[in-house]
Image (spheres, rainbow, N blue to C red):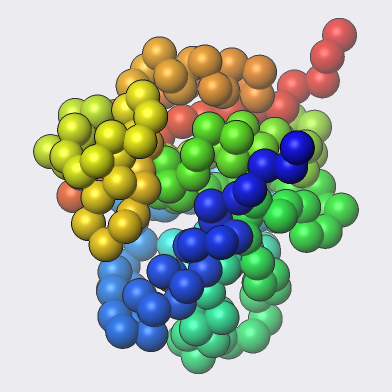
């Protein structure tokens, strides 16, 4: 029996409406995690990255300004149009849900996935991690950020499943702790979990694809 994806059936309309109504809702400054990841990627000579859930590109520009080529995936056509308006059309952005990855057969030196994975259900999270890992080049890095159980919103709304709640506006959100990160990312080269603040408490999750011996 096929899994019915929530992203495909609900989220496209949700994000399209949000971007139409709120436009550049997060401004143009990159998130703290994007700056930290940029520094890490530059230090490790990462030149070609994929950003699933790129939005209107506010976190992409800091990479491009540092000589890193960016490809994106975005579910909202409005957000893609906004990215082209503000940053030009030199950046390739695939239109679609991350649950439909892969969109190409490229191997990327790095992947940056900001505040996206916690919006997915367990099946979709597993698939996203697997698809991102599959598109990493050997010795490539992927960095995810996700909300933590320390957030003030944890426990609010309607409980859907363990640590997952439906809250404001119908958003479904999964709250991670270090144990759940270890469980979900252990097979994807997880090597570091750090805590950062992005208005809410977030984890910065680092993985590396190392060739098996």
Q: Position of residue 196 (x, y in %)?
A: 27, 36
The quadrant where residue 80 appears: bottom right
Q: Position of residue 150 (x, y in %)?
A: 19, 29
Viewer can see residue 175: no
Residue under the point 29% across and 69% down: 26
Residue under the point 12% across and 38% down: 152
In this view, 148 is above or below 116:
above
Residue under the point 71% across and 55% down: 100
Q: Return the residue found at the far front.
A: 1
Q: How many numbered tags mark residues here?
A: 0
The quadrant in which the N terminus is found is top right
The quadrant where residue 90 appears: bottom right
The quadrant in which the C terminus is found is top right
In this view, 81 is above or below 63:
below
Q: Return the residue found at the far top.
A: 213
Q: Position of residue 121 (x, y in %)?
A: 50, 39
Viewer can see residue 210: yes
Q: Return the residue found at the far bottom.
A: 85
Residue under the point 74% across and 48% down: 108
Q: Return the residue found at the far left.
A: 152
Q: Position of residue 201 (x, y in %)?
A: 22, 37
């Amino acid at each position: 029996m096929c899994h019915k994806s929530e992203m495909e059936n609900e989220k496209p309309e949700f994000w399209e409406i949000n971007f139409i109504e709120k436009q550049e809702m997060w401004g143009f400054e990159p998130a703290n995690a994007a700056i930290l990841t940029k520094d890490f990627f530059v230090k490790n000579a990462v030149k070609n990255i994929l950003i699933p859930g790129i939005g209107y590109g506010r976190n992409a520009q800091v990479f491009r300004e540092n000589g890193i080529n960016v490809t994106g995936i975005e579910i909202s056509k409005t957000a893609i149009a906004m990215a082209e308006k503000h940053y030009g059309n030199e950046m390739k952005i695939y239109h679609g849900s991350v649950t439909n990855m892969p969109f190409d057969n490229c191997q990327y030196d790095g992947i940056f996935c900001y505040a996206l994975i916690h919006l997915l259900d367990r099946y979709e999270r597993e698939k996203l991690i697997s698809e991102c890992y599959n598109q990493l080049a050997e010795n490539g890095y992927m960095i995810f950020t996700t909300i933590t159980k320390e957030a003030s919103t944890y426990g609010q709304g309607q409980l859907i499943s363990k640590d997952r709640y439906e809250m404001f506006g119908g958003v479904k959100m999964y709250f991670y702790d270090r144990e759940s990160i270890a469980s979900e990312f252990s097979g994807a080269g997880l090597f570091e979990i750090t805590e950062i603040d992005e208005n809410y408490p977030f984890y910065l999750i680092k993985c590396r694809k190392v060739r098996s011996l």
